[in-house]
């Protein structure tokens, strides 16, 4: 584990342990979550990705759509089971249970019909679709990497749905760190977000106990670091800002503060939400950010906050997670 201090190893191990605990709460207690979602009124109309302005969510471990103008109204709940999901431009990604201890990634069309599926290792953590609907990214927790003292690390992949080309791990990409080539066996990536060109992406890279925001080039298979203490970035629709979770005092054990960074100036604005947000936030539009919070019993709910740091955090949807705006 060259280049990783003892404190760094402890920090990463603790962070992964917390994340795995959250995953266990979110995905193992399936029956209780589904029962809670069944208390929400459900519509009988067929669910599609064309119901805009709408919000695609995971409700009781099933894909559902709710009106963004009337989120308290009836939900269109599908029979598609997902632990994590996201959608854009008529394409959805669903990470769903395959067996009791394995998952598969499924690509869905506008009518939520599967077009492609394949097994992925580990526990599902993040999922994203590019604004055009072409590119899909996912992150899972995996075990067995020799450098991981905690026994777990992350694996992040990308799929081009047009060509079928698949990047099974970003760990093979060449890294430029502080203007110099960099290599370390402890490198981990998570939380991909795409630009509109389907080639450039942002993500988190952790190495030597530090979390970096990176910008990647798929065609060149390269990444370079931009700044530190940025996790789970989410690019704004206008491409100028990143919403992300920032570790308080750079220590994940103290929780995360939901924030927005201007990509041109790197100025950071903390949002009105002061509770710890362990999620990859989603932009509903250029002014509003949605994210998932969990109650002590693991029950998820979706909240929103203004992207400029003003206003207050507002509850949007109970018994739901993984929000994605449908336009």
Image: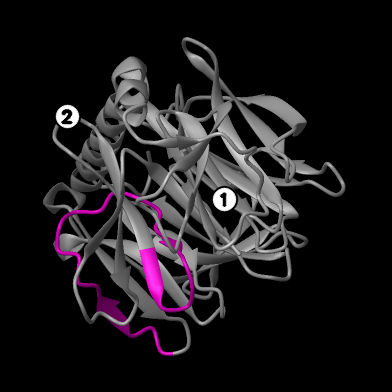
Q: Which mark is residue 128?
A: 1
User: Of all residues shown, which one is farthest toward the top?
Assistant: 100
x then y, percent, for residue 34 = 37, 23
Give the distance between the C-alpha atoms of the residues marked 2 and 1, in whole angstroms. Answer: 26 Å
Q: Secondary structure at mark 1?
A: strand
Q: Which residues are magenta?
A: 265-289
Residue denoted by label 2: 297
Q: Residue at x 70, y 58 (%)?
A: 89
284 relative to 98 in the view: left or right: left
Q: Quadrant of residue 274?
A: bottom left
Name the residue: 40% across, 54% down. Answer: 280
Residue extending furthest bottom? 265
Q: Residue furthest right?
A: 163
Q: Residue at x 69, y 70 (%)?
A: 196
The x and y percentages for residue 52 are: 60, 60
Q: 25 and 264: which one is in front?
A: 25
For the point 87% across and 47% down, the residue is 163
Secondary structure found at label 2 = loop
**Neighbour tally class for label 1: few under 14, some 14-19, many 20 plus, Cα within 10 Å:** many
């Amino acid at each position: 584990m060259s280049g990783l201090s003892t404190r760094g190893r402890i920090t990463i191990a603790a962070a992964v342990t917390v994340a795995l605990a959250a995953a266990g709460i979110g995905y193992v207690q399936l029956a209780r979550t589904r029962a809670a979602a069944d208390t929400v009124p459900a519509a009988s109309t067929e669910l599609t990705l064309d119901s805009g302005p709408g919000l695609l969510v995971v409700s009781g471990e099933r894909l559902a759509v709710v009106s963004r103008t009337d989120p308290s109204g009836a939900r269109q709940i599908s029979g598609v089971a997902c632990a994590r999901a996201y959608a854009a431009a008529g394409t959805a990604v669903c990470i769903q249970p395959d067996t009791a201890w394995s998952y598969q990634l499924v690509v869905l069309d506008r009518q939520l019909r599967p077009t492609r599926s394949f097994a992925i290792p580990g526990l599902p953590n993040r999922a994203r679709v590019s604004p055009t609907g072409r590119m899909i990214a996912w992150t899972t927790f995996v075990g067995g990497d020799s450098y991981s003292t905690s026994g777990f690390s992350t694996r992040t992949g990308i799929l081009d749905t047009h060509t079928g080309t698949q990047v099974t791990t970003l760990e093979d990409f060449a890294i430029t760190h502080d203007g110099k080539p960099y290599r370390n066996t402890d490198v981990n990536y998570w939380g991909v977000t795409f630009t509109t060109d389907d080639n450039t992406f942002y993500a988190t890279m952790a190495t030597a106990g530090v979390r970096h925001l990176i910008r990647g080039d798929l065609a060149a298979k390269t990444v370079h670091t931009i700044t530190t203490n940025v996790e789970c970035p989410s690019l704004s629709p206008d491409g100028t800002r990143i919403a992300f979770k920032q570790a308080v005092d750079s220590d994940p054990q103290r929780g995360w503060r939901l924030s927005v960074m201007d990509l041109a100036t790197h100025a950071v604005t903390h949002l009105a939400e002061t509770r710890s947000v362990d999620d990859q936030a989603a932009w509903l539009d250029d002014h509003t950010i949605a994210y998932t919070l969990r109650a002590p019993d693991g029950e998820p709910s979706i909240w929103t906050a203004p992207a400029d740091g003003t206003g207050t955090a507002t509850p949007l949807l109970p018994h739901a997670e993984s929000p994605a705006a449908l336009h």
